[in-house]
Amino acid sequence: MKPLFRLPGVAPLLLVFSLAVLGLLIVLPLGVVFQQAFAQGLGAYLTPLRDPDALAAIRLTLLVAAISVPLNAVFGLAAAWTVTRFEFRGKTLLLALIDLPFSISPVVSGLVWVLLFGAQGWFGALLQAWGVKIIFATSGIVLATLVVTLPFVARELIPLMQDQGWDEEAAALTLGAGGFTTFFRVTLPNVKWALVYGVLLCNARAMGEFGAVSVVSGHIRGLTDTLPLHIEALYNDYDFVGAFAAATLLASLGLVTLVVKTGLEWRFADELAASRRH
Amino acid sequence: MSSPTARWRQPSVLPGFPLAFGLTVTYLGFIVILPLAALVLKPWSLVLAALRLSFGTSVLAALVDGVLGLIIAWTLVRYEFPGRRLVDAIVDLPFALPTAVAGIALTALYAPTGPLGALAAKFGLKTAYSPLGIFIALLFIGLPFVVRAIEPVLQEFDREVEEAARTLGASDFQRIRQVVLPALAPAWISGVTLAFARAVGEYGSVIFIAGNMPMRTEIAPLLIVIKLEEFDYAGAAAVGVAMVVISFGSLLAINDLQAYLAQRGRA
């Protein structure tokens, strides 16, 4: 590509500035996580990870992701099918609602469940009478996670399916395929990489979510603390090595997500949403 | 007498309206309205301080992200250098790193005992446990939004237009200021808006570095959590509503600005 500036020295200057900003603001914090975790050697790093509370937190985080990610993936497919294959009134509103969780604070996303199901919430008394616990329990954590991760899959699929149109589905239908056959043999293969991409991002957020989960969890160690909440608890106890050791797990998850995501972008650029092509 | 004043009050032959009216309003303002306002707003002072802090630092961080993001996107799109794709991927790190992890990492860096915090202290700056710390965390969270919003537009920007400007004798800076930047404006505003919206609601990366002193470094989302811990559901919901209303109000205003700019760009 032709250099934009003819002025000598501007390009290196901009490059150095950009790299400095990214290094200082973004790469350095990541490095600090690992440096702090291993500050007192490998033994001190591994001990907090073998703690029963830490293991419980990891199990809970995996469980919450295992429930919420598939649900939001199914929702994403249904929403994308609805929005891109049919014309109906109120579609703009529906699209805005799908994006809504991105524009409200995660804390508010958690708060709404407390207002519904908390002890003094709308259904609080009813739930108490039935002996059902949602807030300060796993189900509340799942609900809060569902809200904040709702848009991820839908957002990847909608622009792509809009771009692709429905010619191939129409062809399958005229050839006598049924609705579900068309969906599983035509639609799904066409969007599979975008689906993987969306699920990947959805999963990263589900495992790393802090604000929304913090509101509904109740912070009972070994019981309702997810991994991010466990990190907070250790940090507030001044157990910095423990906190950063647990943080390396989530940081590694983030790095793996980033690598796979970048790989998908390079390899399957054309099969991802148009907005991702760069 | 000018016409708007005439319409505002009935004409009269008697003198002294400006003096009497001015005196009355000033007197009322100081003796009645100001104390009443204090009465109405005082119970909300904690909330107002938190909202001001949240929205103030978010606007500031989003705008600075706007400048940094523009330069970074520019560098990534317009220059070829070894490792460009790696650097491009790194931009997304704040998206991928869970907020709690970012929070404790930034705090470790910028606390008075941390390397950058100690450095800043030499210059008399307090980074962590001050509004500046909140600003830094929000800067981290918002940067990718701006870069990712601008990149595709910059990529597809019609280079022939730029070439035309060049052949017509425009200097580098003229070309950037008058040709490229106006074309980038809508995408830039989108990116900054996204960064702003995310920053306002941000919780995990901020609460560790903020220090959370009431009235000074307590952000609005934290206030919700505190009120919930006190089982003050109504109070928590009120702060939540205030946040949502202000956010959506500003998003609508920005939307209008964008529509206006797009229209002017076409004209």
Image (cartoon, rainbow, N blue to C red):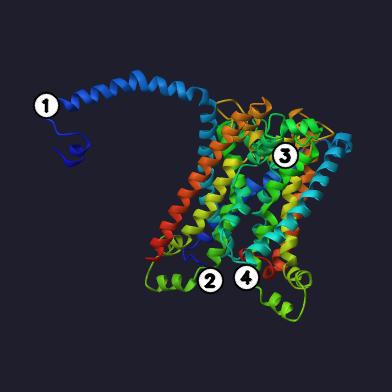
Residue position marked by numbered label 2 in the rendering: A2
Residue A34 in view in this figure: no
* Distance in Å between CA atoms under marks 3 and 2: 49 Å
Count of numbered circles in the view:
4
Q: Residue at x 75, y 39 (%)?
A: A140
Q: Which mark is residue A257?
A: none
Residue position marked by numbered label 3 in the rendering: A213
Q: Where the C terminus of chain B falls, by quadrant?
A: bottom left
- The numbered mark, 2 or 4, whose residue comes first in the sequence reads 2
Q: Residue at x 53, y 71 (%)?
A: A2
Relative side of A257 to B6, left or right: right
The amino acid type of the residue labelled 2 equals Lys
Near-viewer residue (B111 or B23): B23
* Distance in Å between CA atoms under marks 3 and 4: 35 Å
Disc 3 + disc 4, Cβ < 8 Å:
no
The amino acid type of the residue labelled 3 equals Val
Placement of A252 over or under A195, stated as above or below? above
